[in-house]
């Protein structure tokens, strides 16, 4: 889970959409106070903080996060319209793990997020280079799938679907969650699309099709 604190609604939506489309879970807030309420219930794996915020600014939030036991070791990326070296030094001195000046590219944001999470050993299971379950193996570096040692040709969406499920064994994903993670949060498509892709994926997995299990009235899991 990634927490974003950004008061600009358009920028906040853009960041959230990009990260969700890349498979991350995201919660976005327009101020530190709103984020604090959520922190009482759950902790993220990463904070993305804007510096210029109403009320408590991003640097103050960062300082507070670093002073609290439960958030002290959670990585923080600072995003700000200020691009001066002094602002960067302030953020890094207070404990920020990375710093990006606006405007920035979405691909760069996603790359920075993944890099920070890898440094802290918190990368997603589906980001692993190699994932296996049963006789099915995924080599993400080569974008290749084998079943019983034999290569299997999958479409891009079938591959992403298999990686999501195999990379999270035992975790049940609803059809809507799968649509959001594989097709994008705002992708307008009937959930039966997921069923169609699961069907063709199972056909290609052959004897290992049993690994993709249907959870009645919910969705799918790999186990």
Image: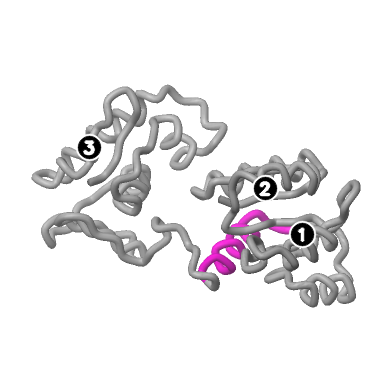
Determine the image quadrant of residue 104.
Answer: bottom right
User: Whole-percent x and y of residue 209?
Assistant: 16, 42
Mark 3 to mark 1 CA distance (whole Å): 41 Å
Residue that badge 2 annotates: 15
Cβ–Cβ under 8 Å for marks 2 and 3: no
Labels 3 and 1: the sequence-earlier one? 1
Residue 214 location, quadrant? top left
Query: What residue is rendered at 16% in x and 55% in y?
Result: 134
Percent position of residue 206, x then y = 11, 44
Residue behind mark 3 = 213
* Left or right placement of residue 154 versus residue 183 in this view: left
Check the image and tell me how it is coloured. one colour
Tag 2 secondary structure: helix
Measure the alpha-carbon separation of dots 1 and 2: 11 Å
| Residue closest to the far left | 207
Is disc 1 in contact with disc 2, using a CB cutoff of under 8 Å? yes
Mark 2 or mark 3: name the one nearer the start of the chain: 2
Q: Nearer the viewer, mark 2 or mark 3?
A: 3
Front residue of 48 and 112:
48
Q: For marks 2 and 3, give the CA distance.
A: 33 Å
The magenta segment is 104-118
Residue at the image point whose x is 23% and y is 50% from the top: 153
- The question of residue 58 being in magenta is answered with no
- Left or right side of 30 for 38: left
The x and y percentages for residue 210 are: 15, 41
> Which residue shows up at 39% across the image and 30% down it?
175
Mark 1, residue position: 79
Give the class, few, some or many, for how many residues have Cα within 10 Å of label 2's Cα (few <14, many ≥20).
many
């Amino acid at each position: 889970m990634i927490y974003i604190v950004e008061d600009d609604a358009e920028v906040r939506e853009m960041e959230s959409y990009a990260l969700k489309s890349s498979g991350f879970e995201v919660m976005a807030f327009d101020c530190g106070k709103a984020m604090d309420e959520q922190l009482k219930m759950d902790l993220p794996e990463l904070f993305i903080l804007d510096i210029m915020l109403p009320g408590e600014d991003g640097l103050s939030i960062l300082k507070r996060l670093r002073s609290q036991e439960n958030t002290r070791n959670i990585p923080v990326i600072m995003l700000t319209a200020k691009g001066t070296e002094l602002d960067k030094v302030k953020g890094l001195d207070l404990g920020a793990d990375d710093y990006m000046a606006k405007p920035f590219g979405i691909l760069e944001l996603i790359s920075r997020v993944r890099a920070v999470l890898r440094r802290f050993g918190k990368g997603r299971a589906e980001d692993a280079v190699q994932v296996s379950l049963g006789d099915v193996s995924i080599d993400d570096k080569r974008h290749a799938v084998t079943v019983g040692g034999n290569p299997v040709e999958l479409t891009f969406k079938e591959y992403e679907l298999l990686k999501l499920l195999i990379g999270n064994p035992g975790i049940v994903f609803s059809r809507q969650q799968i649509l959001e993670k594989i097709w994008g949060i705002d992708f307008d498509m009937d959930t039966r699309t997921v069923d169609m892709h699961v069907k063709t994926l199972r056909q290609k997995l052959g004897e290992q099709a049993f690994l993709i299990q249907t959870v009645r009235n919910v969705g799918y899991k790999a186990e």
